[in-house]
Image: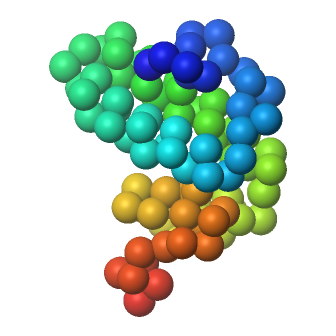
Amino acid sequence: MAGPFTRHSRPSDLSALSATQLSALWRKSAVSLLIAARSADAVLEAVRARAVLLAELERRDPVTMAAWIAAGALEADGPPAYLLGVRSMSSRER
């Protein structure tokens, strides 16, 4: 994955991005994970990238991240949807 997601990424690399930009990266990383499924190394890289992103999201808003996890950490919304307050209708009905 290019951009802020590299083998050596740290959460500080993402600190200048807005919540909207982090949301876009979360969606991109989900697609990358699906594409990476053909290679163990690519899957590991995608998972590491998501870990970096999750660390930044938790650093910014630990209460919201805890709410996402408590709600089941569903990929359909992802943590950025909680940060932006834009969750899917099916998630709100649970």
Name the foreground residue: 30 vs 20: 20
Left or right: 16 with respect to 33? right
Q: Where's residue 60, x and y in %?
A: 80, 50
Is 62 placed left or right of 3 in the picture? right
Relative vertical location of residue 21 with respect to residue 69 in this rendering, above or below = above
Displayed quadrant of residue 43: top left
Q: Position of residue 47 (x, y in %)?
A: 46, 28
Residue 50 drawn at (x, y percent): 53, 34
Examine the image and state in which quarter residue 3 appears: top right
Report the quarter where the C terminus lies. bottom left
Q: Quadrant of the N terminus?
A: top left
Place of residue 42 in the rendered image (x, y in percent of width and height, measured from the top left):
35, 16
Residue 59 in sight here: yes
Residue at the (72%, 32%) spot, across then down: 14
User: Residue at coordinates 80% horizontally, 27% vertically from top-left?
Assistant: 12
**11 shown above or below 6:** below
- Which residue is found at the position 56% from the left and 14% from the top? 6
Residue 70 shows in this picture: no
Q: Is residue 89 above or below residue 9?
A: below
Residue shown at the point (39%, 82%) measured from the top left: 89
- Here the colouring is rainbow
Q: Nearer the viewer, residue 50 or 15?
A: 15
Residue 62 position by quadrant? bottom right
